């Protein structure tokens, strides 16, 4: 039996069909925002090394999307970054270079050396000036990204030239020139703040335009080239850093009215005295240099003044400038570090610069041949000292009677002079970090020097202050005429007015005022602790007259503190209960880190006690 057709309802609407997006069409979410590296290489139609080079030059780095569509084993890039690379003019230049290399190889294969030689002279070239201006719109942005740049340039300045790694001699000379130009500016303007000698190398920190810049320089030793390092990637980074540092040096040199690039004395360059040659270039070319007539002889001072007048003339050629540098007397004691006597810009200098400028003032150093010469030639003038070394091209000889300190790194000395002090190189670095002239007894030749403390570590926040750090702190306080507690005495003992009165530091009236202030502070502290305890226990604190009576009665009681550890623990537990699981895990991880830090500090203290006990037993 066939059922009759039922009539459709009048109010019912036809059901819409579900839309299915065809494969390869429009995407949404992370699939539309990010692409993998293989997809980007295929889209740009380049090989992987060229893609890496473009990313390094343009400053494009991989991204970490929240949801990795293709899997966790892929490297992802943003779609906008790839679109920027697609329209980059460097991409077309690299393609032209690749086609040009094919033409050269083809000419060589056909045994046509004339054509190959002619093609090599017409190779496409490019510059990264536009890329640097795009990546760093302002000068401050460039300074903020200068740490890795300086470290890389100083590293390649100390590497040997290797053809198999494509490290050319010209590139090493360029890195060495850029690094010396940077050091000469820092030394000229006294912008160096900290230095630390480690196993990796020597760390420096300077402050330029309010930005702290830290870099690492390798030791002056023979560098071993490892096999597991991809020097092609490092050379790509170096290509950007060389252009960036040249821009920064140009800006900094013109800020102090010095021409850039500098033209150095070829004789001093041949003797590897680039920093000294740059200092003499500053003396000749700077418009604000000041000549001290008492340091040099009459003929030498007249010659320097004449050179300054000629050097500052607008129509002087660069060749004449190099000739004037060559004519500058090399035996003049003040010629090496005349840049530290420049007092014309004192009004624009900050307090740190003035303090660094006067640290080694009126001190004259002579470097022995076994000490790190380039590092000390950079550090000593940056803090106002005058320095020379053993060898040709030095401003003054070893037999100069005005030398105050000789830096020696030998176990013994054959002959000594009573008019000077013989210290190890660590004394210079420790004085720089402490900003005071430290006693030289512990740094004498043949002695084991004190521990070389890092200025980049805050010992108080770490929880352990070394003994020598406390000694330096007392010497700094003595230089500033401050009062510090004696060893084994805390700050609370120093704040006790009765002890200060008995020691004669303050008089009786000041002692009574200090005692009254201390009593009020203790009362306020006890009141705050009581309120905190009542809040933890759940008792509401109300400002009623009865509370005022209780507080007045508490003033009469003896000054005893409640159990602070229990209050802090209860408050921490109460705060922990209202935390989410994620924040609670982070908090527990922080507590574990604090416990490890405390265990490390306890271990250091235990070692210190054992060392002191061993010393006492040996003395007895």
Image (cartoon, grey):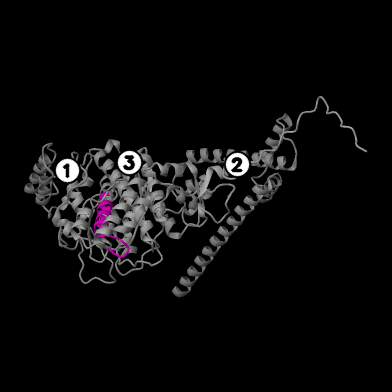
Identity of the residue furthest to the front in this view: 1
Lower sequence index among marks 1 and 2: 1
Q: Which of marks 2 and 3 is nearer the N terminus?
A: 3
Tell me where the magenta segment starts and ends, as one range: 160-181
The quadrant of the picture occupied by the N terminus is top right
| In front of the other: 516 or 193 | 193
- Residue 53: where, in percent of width, then height? 38, 52
Residue lying at the far top in this picture: please name it: 10
Q: Is the residue marked by circle 1 packed among few (<14), some (14-19), or many (20+) residues within 10 Å? A: many
Tell which tag, 1 or 2, sits nearer the viewer: 1
Q: In the picture shown, does residue 620 fall above or below 384? A: below
Residue to which mark 1 is pinned: 285
Residue at 51%, 47% (x, y): give it: 35
**Residue at image location 54% in from the left, 62% down from the top:** 600
Of badges 2 and 3, nearer the viewer stands 3
Whether residue 303 is visible to the viewer of this picture, yes or no, is yes
Image spot of residue 391 (x, y percent): 17, 63
Pointer 2 residue? 522
Q: Nearer the viewer, residue 312 or 516?
A: 312
What is the spatial separation of the Cα atoms under label 2 and label 3, in whole angstroms?
65 Å
Instruction: Point out the tag, 3 or 1, that comes first from the N-terminus.
Output: 3
The residue wearing badge 3 is 130
SS of the residue at dot 1?
helix
């Amino acid at each position: 039996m066939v059922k009759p057709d039922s009539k459709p309802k009048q109010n019912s609407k036809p059901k819409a069909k579900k839309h299915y997006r065809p494969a390869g069409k429009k995407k949404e979410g992370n699939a539309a925002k990010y692409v993998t590296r293989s997809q980007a290489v295929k889209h740009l139609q380049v090989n992987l090394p060229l893609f890496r080079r473009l990313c390094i030059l343009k400053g494009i780095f991989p991204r970490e999307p929240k949801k990795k569509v293709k899997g966790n084993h892929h490297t992802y890039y943003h779609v906008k970054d790839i679109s920027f690379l697609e329209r980059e003019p460097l991409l077309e230049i690299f393609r032209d270079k690749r086609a040009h290399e094919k033409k050269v190889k083809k000419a060589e294969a056909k045994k046509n050396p004339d054509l190959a030689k002619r093609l090599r002279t017409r190779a496409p070239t490019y510059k990264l000036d536009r890329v640097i201006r795009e990546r760093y719109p302002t000068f401050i942005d460039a300074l903020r990204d200068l740490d890795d740049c300086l470290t890389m340039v100083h590293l390649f300045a100390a590497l040997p030239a290797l053809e198999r790694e494509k490290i050319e001699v010209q590139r090493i000379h360029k890195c060495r020139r850029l690094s010396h130009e940077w050091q000469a500016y820092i030394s000229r303007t006294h912008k160096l703040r900290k230095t630390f000698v480690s196993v990796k190398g020597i760390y420096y920190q300077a402050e330029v335009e309010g930005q702290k810049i830290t870099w690492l320089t390798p030791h002056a030793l023979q560098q071993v080239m490892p096999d597991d390092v991809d020097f092609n990637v490092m050379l790509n980074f170096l290509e950007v850093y060389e252009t960036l540092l040249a821009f920064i040096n140009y800006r900094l040199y013109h800020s102090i009215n010095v021409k850039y690039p500098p033209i150095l004395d070829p004789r001093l360059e041949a003797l590897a005295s680039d920093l000294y040659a740059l200092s003499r270039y500053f003396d000749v070319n700077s418009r604000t240099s000041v000549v001290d007539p008492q340091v040099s002889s009459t003929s030498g001072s007249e010659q320097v003044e004449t050179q300054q007048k000629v050097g500052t003339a607008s129509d002087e050629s660069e060749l004449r400038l190099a000739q004037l540098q060559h004519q500058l007397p090399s035996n003049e004691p003040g010629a090496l570090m005349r840049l530290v006597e420049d007092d014309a810009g004192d009004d624009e200098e900050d307090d740190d610069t003035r303090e660094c400028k006067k640290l080694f003032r009126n001190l004259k150093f002579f470097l022995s041949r076994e000490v790190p010469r380039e590092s000390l030639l950079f550090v000593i003038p940056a803090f106002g000292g005058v320095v020379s070394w053993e060898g040709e091209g030095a401003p003054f000889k070893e037999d100069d009677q005005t030398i105050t300190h000789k830096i020696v790194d030998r176990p013994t000395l054959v002959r000594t002079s009573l008019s000077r002090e013989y210290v190890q190189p660590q004394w210079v670095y420790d004085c720089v970090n402490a900003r005071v002239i430290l006693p030289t007894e512990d740094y004498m030749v043949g002695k084991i020097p004190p521990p070389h403390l890092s200025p980049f570590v805050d010992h108080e926040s770490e929880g352990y202050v070394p003994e020598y750090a406390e000694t330096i702190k007392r010497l700094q306080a003595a230089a500033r005429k401050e009062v510090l507690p004696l060893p084994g005495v805390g700050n609370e003992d120093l704040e006790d007015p009765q002890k200060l009165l008995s020691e004669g530091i303050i008089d009786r009236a000041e002692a009574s005022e200090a005692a009254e202030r201390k009593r009020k502070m203790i009362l306020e502290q006890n009141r705050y602790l009581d309120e905190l305890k009542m809040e933890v226990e759940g008792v509401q604190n109300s400002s009623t007259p009865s509370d005022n009576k209780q507080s007045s009665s508490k003033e009469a009681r003896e000054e005893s503190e409640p159990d602070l550890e229990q209050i802090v623990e209860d408050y921490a537990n109460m705060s922990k209960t209202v935390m989410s699981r994620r924040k609670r895990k982070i908090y527990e991880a922080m507590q574990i880190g604090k416990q490890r830090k405390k265990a490390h500090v306890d271990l250091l203290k235990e070692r210190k006690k054992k060392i002191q006990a061993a010393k006492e037993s040996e003395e007895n």
